[in-house]
Image (cartoon, rainbow, N blue to C red):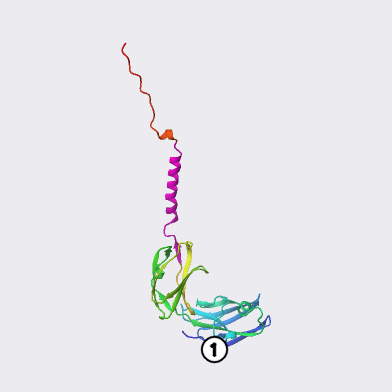
């Protein structure tokens, strides 16, 4: 993975804090085009350009508060893994939440980009368009390192709903979605190494369904209920044999 290089700087004063943005440019370039401050948040607009079609990038913000060692946690928007090249991409950084409400000073932020290469490769997962609850699925992958410990995070849209935690990187895992997983679409797994936030893979989206369709559960119950009502509605006399009189015998004259 090639680190983008060459540096340009932008500095802006806001709520007593000077923020210096350091950006990297090259044949593949990331260029800050605008910076705004509203409601204690820093809004960064940048262009990410690449002459090679189909490549993705990881984009991270780093701070001088820890000498640019760890990516910032309070960034949102087009930041993180699998960012497509394009113009006018946006990041929102919650500076006060990241640094504390009492912070008042100077901080430099560095915007870094790397070509994104998945650290593991999912095998055949693209063929799974639906997953049924309480059914076993054998998830298979290749790559990574033996020391990788994985979390399989189940997302619905942007909301995490379940974590299958601390999975050894042995290339396979038998998974079963629990019964309380809500049926619906827009599900996907975000698979991450528990110690390295730059090692993340996202699967294609899939739909979650019930193991037994709801209509098959409702129809037998409705039939049984109807039978109970039918038998309960009969009077004892309607189910008993019909009574009739035997005529008296004819006596001789």
* Secondary structure character of the magenta stretch overall: helix
Q: Is residue 211 magenta?
A: yes
Q: Is residue 189 above or below residue 14?
A: above
Q: Is residue 39 above or below residue 112?
A: above
Q: Where residue 89 sits in the image (x, y, percent)?
A: 56, 76
Name the residue: 40% across, 70% down: 125
The residue carrying pointer 1 sits among few (fewer than 14), some (14 to 19) or many (20 or more) residues within 10 Å by Cα, namely: few
Viewer can see residue 214: yes
Query: What residue is disc 1 on?
Result: 6
Q: Is residue 205 above or below residue 74?
A: above
Q: Where residue 133 sits in the image (x, y, percent)?
A: 43, 62
Name the residue: 43% across, 35% down: 236
Q: Quadrant of the C terminus?
A: top left
Q: Which quarter of the picture shows residue 61?
A: bottom right
Q: Nearer the viewer, residue 161 or 15?
A: 161
Which residue, as the protein is rendered here, is positioned at the far left?
A: 252
Label 1 secondary element:
loop
Q: Which quarter of the picture shows residue 252?
A: top left
Q: Is residue 243 magenta?
A: no
Total marks shown come to: 1
Q: Where residue 159 sits in the image (x, y, percent)?
A: 53, 68
Span highlighted in magenta in the image:
206-234
Q: Nearer the viewer, residue 102 or 121?
A: 102
Query: Quick check: 42 left or right of 179?
Result: right
Q: Where residue 165 sits in the image (x, y, percent)?
A: 46, 72
Q: Nearer the viewer, residue 167 or 67?
A: 167
Viewer can see residue 83: no
């Amino acid at each position: 993975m090639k680190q983008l290089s060459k540096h340009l700087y932008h500095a802006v004063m806001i709520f007593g804090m000077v923020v210096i943005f350091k950006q990297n440019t090259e044949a593949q370039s990331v260029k800050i085009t605008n910076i705004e401050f509203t409601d204690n948040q820093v809004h960064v607009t940048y262009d990410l350009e690449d002459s090679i079609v189909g490549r993705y990038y990881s984009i991270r913000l780093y701070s001088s508060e820890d000498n640019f060692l760890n990516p910032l946690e309070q960034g949102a928007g087009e930041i993180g893994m699998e960012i497509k090249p394009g113009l006018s991409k946006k990041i929102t950084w919650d500076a006060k939440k990241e640094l504390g409400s009492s912070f008042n000073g100077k901080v430099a932020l560095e915007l870094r980009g790397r070509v994104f290469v998945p650290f593991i490769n999912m095998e055949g997962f693209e063929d799974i368009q639906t997953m049924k609850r309480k059914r076993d699925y054998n998830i298979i992958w290749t790559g990574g390192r033996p020391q990788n410990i994985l979390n399989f995070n189940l997302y619905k849209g942007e909301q995490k709903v379940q974590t299958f935690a601390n999975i050894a990187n042995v290339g396979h895992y038998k998974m079963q979605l629990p019964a309380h997983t809500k049926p619906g679409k827009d599900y996907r797994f975000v698979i991450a190494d528990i110690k390295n936030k730059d090692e993340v893979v996202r699967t294609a989206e899939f739909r979650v369904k019930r193991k037994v369709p709801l209509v098959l559960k409702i129809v037998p119950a409705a039939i049984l209920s109807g039978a109970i009502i039918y038998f309960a509605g009969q009077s004892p006399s309607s189910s008993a044999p019909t009574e009739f009189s035997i005529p008296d015998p004819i006596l001789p004259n």
